[in-house]
Amino acid sequence: MARLILFGPPGAGKGTQAAALSRQLKVPHISTGDIFRSAIAARSDLGLKVQNYLDEGKLVPDVVVIDMVRDRLSQPDIAEGWILDGFPRTVPQAQALDQLLSEINQDYSRVLNLQVSEALLIERLLGRQRKDDTEDVIQERLRVYRNDTAPVLAFYEQGTRLVNIDGAADVEIVTSRIQSAVSGVE
Ligand code: ADP
C-alpha cells in the first residue's frame, strides 16, 4: 500500500509530484502547506495562528503542525494509503509521525527525497509568485530547510526506505523516476 513521504527543500517539486501521484494511486494528498493556506484564506483560528509564520518563511511550531496531522490521519480516507507533502519538516515532527503511525497500526512505505540544487530552487521559486516567494522569504525558507529540515534525512537514513530522486528534470521525467521508486511497494 502506498504510504509515502515526499521530502525535499522548498521548490523541489513536492506539491506537483504529490498531486500527480495522488491521482495515479488514488490516495489522498496531505500537504501541510496547503492546509495552512486554506485555513488562512478561511480566516479560521488555525489560519490566524499560522499566518505570520508562513508570511515570514518560518516554521509553524511543531505542536501546531503535529496536532493538525494527527487530526488529518484520523480521517477514514487514509485507510488505503496517503502521500504526505511538507511533513515531517523537523526531527521532532519525524519522531511524532512514527508515534502517530504506530498508534493507528500503520507504517510508511517510502521516503522520497527530491534533490535539486539551490540555484535551481531559487530560480523556480522566484518564477512561482506565491505570496511567500519573495527573495527575502525564499532565502529564509532555504535557511530553515538547511538548519531544521535537512537533519530529518539522517533520521530516515537509519532505515532502508529512503530513496533519493533527482528532481532537476521536467515534471514528467521526475514523476516516472518516482513511479519506479514506488513500484512494488506493498
Ligand atoms: P514549500 O515546500 O514550497 O516551502 P509548503 O507549502 O510546504 O511550501 O510550506 C509553506 C509554509 O508552510 C512553510 O514555509 C511553513 O511556514 C509552513 N509549513 C508547512 N509545513 C510545515 C511543517 N511541517 N512544519 C512547520 N511549518 C510548516
Image (cartoon, grey):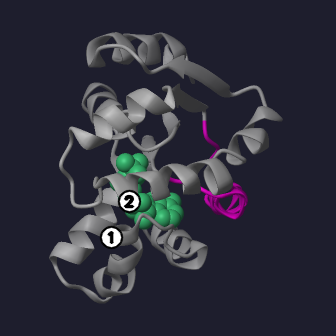
Picture coordinates of residue 19, whole percent (x, y)? 28, 36
In percent of the image, x 60 and y 33: which residue is there? 109
- Residue 160 vs residue 17, the one in the foreground: 17
Q: Nearer the viewer, residue 181 or 54?
A: 54
Q: Identity of the amino acid at label 1? A: Asp
* Res. 12 in view: no
Q: Quadrant of residue 163?
A: top right
Identify the amino acid type marked 2.
Val
- What crowding class fits label 1: few (fewer than 14 Cα within 10 Å), some (14-19), or many (20 or more)? few
Relative to 152, 14 lies left or right: left
Q: Please name the residue shown 52% across and 38% down the image.
A: 8
**Which residue in the protein does label 2 denote?**
137
Residue 98 in the magenta stretch? The answer is yes
First in sequence, mark 1 or 2: give its number: 1
In the rendered image, residue 165, in percent from the top left (x then y), is placed at 53, 19
In front of the other: label 1 or label 2? 2
The numbered mark at residue 184 is none
Tell me which segment is drawn in magenta.
87-108
Q: Where's residue 50, x and y in %?
A: 38, 78
Task: Please state if 12 lies on the left or on the right of 151 as rendered.
Answer: left
Q: Are marks 1 and 2 in contact (CB under 8 Å)?
A: yes
Please say whether residue 97 is one of the residues in the magenta stretch: yes
Q: Which residue is mark 1?
A: 55
Residue at mark 1 to residue at mark 2: CA–CA distance: 8 Å
